[in-house]
Image (cartoon, helix red, strand yellow):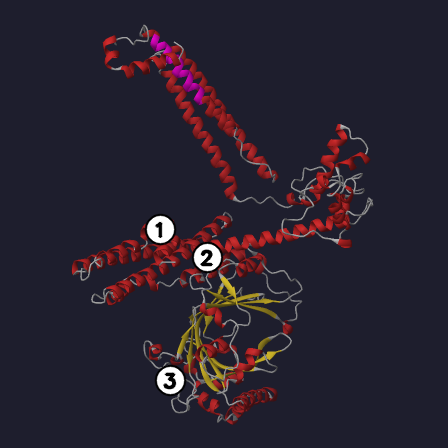
Amino acid sequence: MLFGSKLDNEVYEPWKEYYMNYTSLKKLLKEGVILKNSWTEKDEQNFVSALDADLDKVYTFQSQKYDQLNDILEGLQIQTETASQQFDEKKFSVKLDETLAVAQELEHFQRLNYTGFTKIVKKHDRIHPEFSVKPLLNVRLKNLPYHNEDYSPLLYKISALFQFLRDNYKVDQSLSKLSSFHEDITKQEFESFKFWIHKDNLMEVKTNILRHLPVLVYRKDTKQHQTMEELMNNDSDDDENEDEDYNNPIINCLYFDSPSFELYNDKLIKANNSSSLRIKWVGKLLDKPKIIIEKKVFDQTSQDFNVGEKLSIKEKYLDSFVQGDFDSTKFVKKMNKRGSSKEEIESFEKVVNNLESFIKDHDLQPCVRSTYKRTAFQIPGDDKVRIVIDSDLTFIREDAFDHERPIRDPSKWHRTDIDSKINNPFSLLRKGEYSKFPYSVMEIKIKKNNNKQRSHWINELVSSHLVKEIPNFSKFIQGIASLFLEDDKLDNIPLWFHDLEGDIKVDPEQAYIDSKNVKKHNDEDNLLKFKTMISNSASAATFSPRSKSFSGSLLPQGTPPISELKLSEVEGQIVPEEGRSPPTGAANPASSRLDESSDEDEDDEEELPPLTPQHFINKITGGRDAVAKLIDVDSEEEEIQLPEGVSKPDSYIKNAGPLKIEPKVWMANERTFNRWLHVTTLLSSLTFVVYSSAKKSNSFQVAEGLAYFYFALTLFSGVWGYYTFNKRREIIIERSEKHLDNIVGPLIISIGLILALVINFIFGFKHLAQKQKVNNFTVAGLNDTFYAEHPFHKAVHEFVFRLVGY
């Protein structure tokens, strides 16, 4: 799809005038290229002026809209601080949802316009390379940085407000309760699901999750790990700003592997005892973050990689640790001085020795780094559901496999160039040394319990067109495969690798059509199975009054079994769907009998007793309705003969519980009533205007009669509006399935007005004609000479006189 069409299709209609005018810019671009060398400086000036005007328009609108959303959220925040008994949580929730939707549209507005400006400038520079506009665009984007607007502050505010509702007003409590204390915390097991998210859908996915889970805010906190970690991170100057919050922190993971990619190949095929090793830190190394060495081991029972051994260490010890020269003796002495227990010391030595041995035995070295921004969603203190989204994922080579041209200094544990103190260290990367992952990665972890049913909103999210599930996705495997694909030592490539060649984005309309088709297919399958079940259960000659069979308990007493009914009586109810073969053989005797009955002659009717008209009606209604009530129970008012011991309930389950009706339903009813009041007011005005001017009219009697007629319509309109309002209110309260519309009132008003106009025309014209003393269809003041000169007027006058019967 061309970008111009894409822009037209995805424009948010209320903001249509604030988007860039891509079509106009494209026309300006093509105006001067019809003839060779016809693109002049004047044409260039026109294009640049239009481009700059669009940039200014987009930036101004987005800035104002962003500030407006921020003010709305601050106002909602004030409401939470001054909340009282009159606090309307429903109105508050609706306003918050609307703000979230606008924020989502604004982010899409930002992305769409930025793409359009980039494309139109690229097209311009390709057609007219002598007039390059890209440098100008970069300068203007620095002055009008609408594309750098960060929506995280808005999302955090919205997240906090949703959490306020969950904590205080029981809004969406399905995930807000703490985990059960009866669960064995030491044996927690989780289900993990991984998905890819297209960049165009990322904001929508985040906003959907925010309605149910708050955003976790990361902190620099080195006090979470004590004893052995403290000993290796105990410098006081390294703990500055430890309480500083991280919003969307940049996480770095440096993965180890051997020159033969042993860990990669084993992990990809999930070999027994396969392991992975990585060094992980958050932020920049210049900020001296906490660094963790982590080894994961594949668990055959859970089919997942679990953390086997973990060690926190300072950066200055990593070079010796990776090279196998790390001396843990002095740390053991420090632990003894601090009074650590013997078990803690032994555990520390065991972890260090195991990690060093693992590196040495498998000839491991750092080879691939992954960097990404992480956004986590979880209710604090509740581990039932945790969702993590990693975006801006980039893989970087850090290996020293080639001894002649190593990418990383073999004596160092990491690349010092990209961790140096420069503004953009990634600009030092050469082609082939890095790979940008095109999508964001989402992982959903759900705690396993006896209740297999997941939250409805999670099922909707994972089943939507917004995400694509990729089972067993691994950043380590993807990084190795993308950077070392041509290496012969890679025995396998991941199954999802070729999915990256296509676009995972799905058109929402097509996704909706596909989901409807799948649902329809499933419904047809379920209906066919249900019909088959009914046919099988109905093959018996009689039914016990207290039969446990679902179909048997619903058949009226005295109704013949379905197998004894003729095909003409059940046609359209039991016959399978087109394209489906009916059950055959002994497995479905009822169906086989129906098939046999289709070949019978009309003479077989003589074997049946004579049918009276009443019998004939019973035969038709009884046979069809019996099956129809079993298959398509559309109304609770249908009379079904209940078995013995079962009585009709006084109230239905759907009417149980408190009455909860959305405000928009009441508002719709009130809006209809207001419309009728408006009509009543108009009719009353018409009544008094006609009545007050009756003496000045051509016919006082006609005017007075019409005034009384309009007054009757006025009274009817007011009474009908009040009746409709109360009738709809009763239907809503009763939760009835009755229709709310009623066309009787509008028809009476419409017919009455038409009738009044016809009467006014006929009698009014008659009176006028009599008053003017019309002779021989000639209006007073007009003579034969006028009609001779204007024959058309004479024909019109004659037609009107005949029409009114004069």
Task: Tell me if residue 26 comes above or below residue 768 in the rendering.
Answer: below
Mark 1 residue type: Trp
Query: Compared with residue 703, is residue 682 higher up or lower down, i.e. above or below?
Result: below
Q: Is residue 732 visible?
A: yes
Q: Which span of residues is magenta-colored? A: 753-769
What amino acid is found at the position of numbered circle 3 in the picture? Thr
Task: Please name the residue shown 49% across and 39% down the image.
Answer: 668
Label 2 crowd (10 A; few <14 / some 14-19 / many >=20)? few
Q: Is residue 745 above or below residue 283?
A: above
Image position, residue 167 (x, y; %): 54, 58
Distance in Å between CA atoms under marks 1 and 2 = 22 Å
Judging from the image, what secondary structure is the residue with disc 3 in?
loop
Distance, label 3 to label 1, CA atoms, is 48 Å
Q: Amino acid at mark 2?
A: Asp
- Tell me which numbered mark, 3 or 2, is placed earlier along the sequence: 3
Which marked residue is nearer to the observer: mark 3 or mark 1? Answer: 1
Viewer-side residue, 693 vs 349? 693
User: Which of 210 and 517 lies nearest the eye of the viewer?
Assistant: 517
Magenta segment's dominant SS is helix
Which of the pair 420/698 is nearer the observer? 698
- Label 3, label 2: how far apart the Cα atoms are: 44 Å
Task: Report the residue marked by disc 2.
Answer: 507
